[in-house]
Image (cartoon, helix red, strand yellow):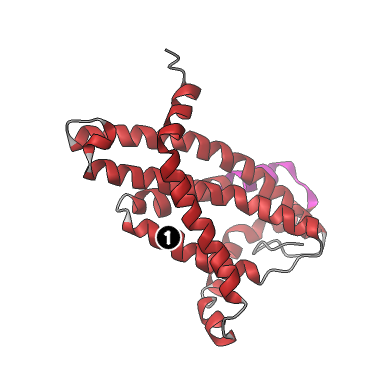
């Protein structure tokens, strides 16, 4: 029997494929719902739902603002540091916001469902200078969004395994818990790979935004 790491990762995905599809469908349906409802939503309500965005932008500016000019100038060391920082922030966010909270199962509905709906409302208001710019922006974001689904699936799987140990063919909840965390670790190998690519992609996109005259922070299409 092939027991290599790639085969174990593939086996984990095969076992959890239904869970991943269900969670992914929920998340992306909610994003679509946010885009659709934003078109008929009263302006006052849309403004209220977006009231957190200025605070978020200020937080992002404090972290990334110092990198703006060096990235625009193409300084290699800064670009590497910028990519690494994006990767670490996204990875920690996936683990804390999606995996840990999703162990309780119900919070997964809110972090992905409500979060996806608000994200769709925000996406409906973006403007790009070209279809290419919008497509690249969505591709860059899409890579990160996929990891939300995988991270949430890892957490929900742990929670379900603790509730029903037979899900892991385990005699005790503790053994089921350990096996579910092993599966989460294999999912995170994929998450890490996707986020590493996404971080470099985001750095290149930010530089393009800066060269096109945008601020790059917060990140919007050029």
**Who's the residue at 33% across and 36% down the image?**
181
Picture layout, residue 150 above or below residue 190 = below
How many C-alpha atoms fall within 10 Å of the one at disc 1: few (<14), some, or many (≥20)?
some
Please state if 167 lies on the left or on the right of 15 as rendered.
Answer: left
Is residue 59 visible to the viewer in this orientation of the structure?
no
Q: Position of residue 201 (x, y in %)?
A: 68, 46
The residue tagged 1 is 111
Secondary structure of the residue carrying numbered label 1? helix
* In the displayed structure image, the side of residue 99 where residue 176 appears, left or right: left
Q: Main secondary structure of the magenta part?
A: helix
Residue 166 horizontal side relative to residue 9, left or right: left
Q: Position of residue 6 (x, y in %)?
A: 50, 24
200 w.r.t. 15: above or below: below
Above or below 68: residue 150? above
- Residue at image point 73% right, 69% down: 127
Magenta highlight on residue 98: no
Q: Residue at (41%, 38%) from the top-left corner?
A: 16
Task: Work out whether residue 61 or residue 105 is closer to the camera in this orientation and state it.
Answer: 105
Q: Residue at x 34, y 43 (%)?
A: 157
Q: Residue 192: image x %, image y %?
A: 52, 38
Asked whether residue 115 is in view, the answer is yes
Which quadrant of the rendered structure holds the N terminus?
A: top left
Q: Residue furthest top?
A: 1
Where is the C terminus found, in terms of image quarters? bottom right
**Total numbered circles:** 1
Residue 168, given in percent of the width and then of the height, sits at 28, 33
Picture quarter containing residue 211? bottom right
In the image, the segment drawn in magenta is 73-85
Would residue 77 be counted in the magenta stretch?
yes
Q: Nearer the viewer, residue 65 or 202?
A: 202
Closer-to-camera residue (43/83): 43
């Amino acid at each position: 029997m092939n027991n290599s790491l790639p085969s174990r990762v593939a086996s984990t995905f095969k076992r959890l494929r239904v869970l991943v599809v269900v969670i992914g469908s929920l998340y992306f349906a909610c994003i679509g719902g946010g885009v659709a409802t934003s078109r008929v939503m009263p302006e006052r309500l849309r403004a209220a739902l977006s009231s957190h965005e200025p605070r978020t932008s200020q937080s992002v500016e404090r972290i990334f603002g110092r990198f703006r000019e060096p990235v625009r100038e193409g300084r290699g060391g800064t670009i590497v540091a910028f990519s690494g920082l994006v990767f670490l922030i996204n990875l920690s966010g996936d683990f804390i916001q999606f995996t840990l909270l999703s162990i309780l199962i119900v919070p997964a509905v809110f972090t992905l469902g409500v979060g996806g709906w608000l994200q769709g409302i925000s996406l409906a208001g973006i403007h790009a200078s070209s279809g290419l710019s919008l497509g690249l922006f969505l591709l860059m974001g899409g890579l990160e969004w996929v990891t939300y689904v995988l991270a949430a699936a890892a957490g929900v799987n742990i929670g379900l395994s603790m509730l029903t140990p037979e899900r892991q063919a385990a005699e005790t909840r503790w053994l089921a818990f350990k096996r579910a965390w092993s599966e989460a670790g294999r999912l995170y190998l994929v998450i890490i790979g996707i986020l590493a690519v996404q971080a470099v992609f985001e750095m290149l996109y930010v530089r393009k935004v800066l060269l096109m005259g945008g601020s790059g922070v917060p990140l919007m299409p050029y």
